Amino acid sequence: MRKKGDDKMMLRKSGCKVTPARLAILNVFKKAKKPLSAQEVIETLHETDQATVYRTLKSLEEKGILRHIDLRHNHAHYELADLAEHHHLVCLECGKIEIVHHCGMEETQNRIVRSSKHFAEIKQHALEFYGICKSCAARQKKL
Amino acid sequence: MRKKGDDKMMLRKSGCKVTPARLAILNVFKKAKKPLSAQEVIETLHETDQATVYRTLKSLEEKGILRHIDLRHNHAHYELADLAEHHHLVCLECGKIEIVHHCGMEETQNRIVRSSKHFAEIKQHALEFYGICKSCAARQKKL
DNA sequence: AATTATTTGCAAATAATTCGCATTTATAAT
DNA sequence: ATTATAAATGCGAATTATTTGCAAATAATT
């Protein structure tokens, strides 16, 4: 696990100011064992305003420090971007989340289920790609 | 493309009543070339109440007729579940969506980019599994 | 210590989704 | 065809999720 000093360095390197709010938010994610919603962060850090949390999540995502995760709940989740590659098992009924490691896409869903502690069945999976479209790439070059 | 009568059959088979609202919503999706948000459906069908649209999207999803898609916009998208397997290219800048066909997961992202009309670069992808966790499976058996 | 560009908190706005309830309607039973 | 009934709808309001404007606070720089 990364040390505190590393967080400050990381923030500075990415052009962020090092503030108590940002360090606190990073810490919440370091302690978490699963992706967190904005609300979960807000509830954990009742000292920090919700607008600040939303703004921080977004900017840390843009810097590549946090990663945005969609889990078909009605809100976004985030996790640290430097975690080992993994996927998520999401319960369609209750929303429970489990982390799945060591999963090349070739591995079958069945194998994942067999090795899962909490899941009985996989019914669907979603794979999305996120990138930059050509018109945005062109616009960025101009600026 | 499926004919109108097929929609009625499909709804009946899944235990839904055949109503004008549902047929209209299915039609919107049949005409669409990309995943639609609830708002897009609502704007297209200004005769239908938004609560009805939300309820219909959810129940058609539960019946397996629509599929829920997360695109990191701040709202859900849906598409017909019986479309050929495909994924989505989502622009991190402007949100533009492009459908990607013929994509086994083994195919590289680079190859996808090369064959894409609109995208210059893929920076990330997300793969999520959706299923039923053991405690929900147990509870469902009891009922 | 003074300057400056960021960041924060607060309050209010907007967006996304859901809920309660009275009414209507599709289907099944007569 | 008529009726009974469970499901679906519309409406308004409530919730939940996220964003915004602006003034005050603060981290980094000089």
Image (cartoon, coloured by chain):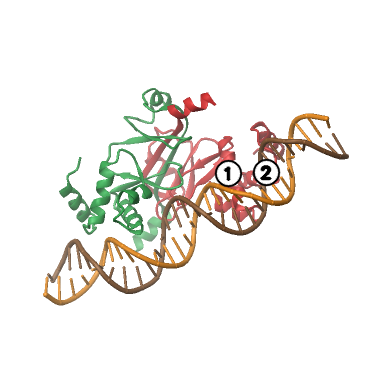
Chain colours: A green, B red, C orange, D brown
Whether residue B28 is visible: yes
Near mark 1 (Cα within 10 A), the count class, few <14, some 14-19 or many ≥20, is many
The x and y percentages for residue D12 are 61, 59
Q: Earlier in the sequence, mark 2 or mark 1?
A: 2
Q: Chain of mark 1?
A: B
Determine which quarter of the picture holds residue A69: top left
Residue visible at 26% across and 55% down in the picture: A21
In the rendered view, would you say B10 is above or below C18?
above
Residue underneath mark 2? B23
Q: Please identify the quadrant where the N terminus of chain A is shown.
A: top left
Q: Are marks 2 and 1 in contact (CB under 8 Å)?
A: no
Q: Residue tagged by mark 1? A: B57
Q: Secondary structure at mark 1?
A: helix
| Location of residue A14 (image quadrant) | bottom left
Q: Is residue B32 left or right of residue B86?
A: right
> Front-most of B18 and B32?
B18
With respect to residue A127, does B45 lie above or below?
Answer: below
Mark 2 residue element: helix
Q: Is residue A70 left or right of residue B55?
A: left
Rendered residue at 18%/52% (across/down): A8
Q: Quadrant of the C terminus of chain A?
A: bottom left
- Circle 2: residue type: Leu
Taking the spot 38% from the left edge, 37% from the top edge, the residue there is B108
